[in-house]
Image: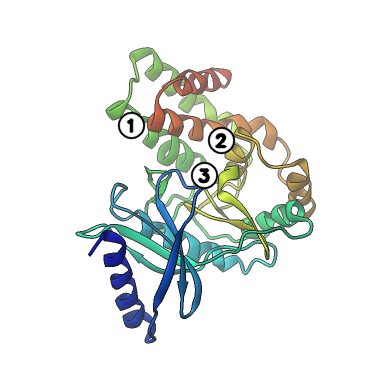
Amino acid sequence: MNIVSQLFKHIEQKHLEEFGNKLTINNHNSLGGGCINHALKLETNQGALFLKWNSSVPTDLFIREAESLNELHKSNNEFLQFPKPLLAKEIDKLPGYLLTSYLQPGHSIDDDEKLGRGLATLHRISQNQFGFKNNNYCGATLQDNSVKTNWIDFYLENRIGHLIKLIKKNRGWHENDEKTSAAFIKKAPLSLSHNPKPSLIHGDLWSGNRMSTSQGPALIDPCACYCDREFEMGIMTMFGGFSSRVFEAYNEAYPLPHGWRERNNIYQLYHILNHYYLFGGHYKQQALEIMRRFI
């Protein structure tokens, strides 16, 4: 029995245990577009479902992603679609996987406006502390989500500082780089004095994690956390792919604080450092240039 057949058998058994009804997988088709995981559309006796699986990622990655999707669903979002997680499994003798509802690709009217207003709806979900109930993964990078009441501490320690520690273990980070990052961490609070409240964010919202469906725009592959909502805009503005109408609609529904564009580079910094950690190359110099602007 090959891996896919073993996974299907496991899924059918776990579905029966979890939901008390029999799931039968009748057919499957490979889906493109992913750069890390295997992805399949499943034809079942309960309709189409989506499955992604892998044995070469962090052991609990799909468990953590399912938690993020469940958190995003708390927004009861009338503008955005999110896959509904059904089953998630850690890696053991079999690959880990995530089974979700299937989102039918397509387009709806005013997708960009819906995306902006949907993000505003999502970001209005709040709690008392920054962080999340468990650590999760931005791509394959472990994020420290231990909670803090102060945003500056959370961002500089749990995001920038944590990532630099990972970089030191796996990439080049020399004495001068350390001096630059230490000076940045010391001076950055002066630029982050806008006192944000914790907002629920997707966490990795580049254009590849935005999907057009027949029911409206959808967000996939989240690493949810309660952060400054401006942090979401860091990666959205870093690679492009989001029209001006997205940001206009967002601001009509939930205006961003004065000065957010000046702070945007500070929030792009995290994702640039993460790209350096994951891929190496020119991203280190790009990150250091941003740090020097705020020293």
Residue 165 numbered mark, or none: 1
User: Which residue does the image show at 49% across and 34% down from the upper left?
Assistant: 270
Q: Is residue 77 above or below residue 271?
A: below
Residue for badge 3: 151
Lateral position of residue 37 relative to residue 110, left or right: left
Look at the image and tell me in which quarter the N terminus lies.
bottom left
Q: Position of residue 93 (x, y in %)?
A: 19, 59
Q: Residue furthest bottom?
A: 20
Q: Is residue 188 above or below residue 49?
A: above
Q: Could you say whether the residue bearing mark 1 is in a helix, strand or loop?
A: helix
Neighbours of disc 1 within 10 Å: few (<14), some (14-19), many (20+) = few
Residue for badge 2: 267
CA distance for labels 2 and 3: 12 Å
Q: Nearer the viewer, mark 3 or mark 1?
A: 1
Q: Residue furthest top?
A: 176
CA distance for labels 3 and 1: 20 Å
What coloring was used for the rendering?
Answer: rainbow
Q: Nearer the viewer, mark 2 or mark 3?
A: 2
Look at the image and tell me in which quarter the C terminus lies.
top right
Neighbours of disc 2 within 10 Å: few (<14), some (14-19), many (20+) = many
Q: Is residue 55 above or below residue 289?
A: below
Neighbours of disc 3 within 10 Å: few (<14), some (14-19), many (20+) = many
Q: Could you say whether the residue bearing mark 3 is in a helix, strand or loop?
A: helix
Amino acid tagged 3: Trp
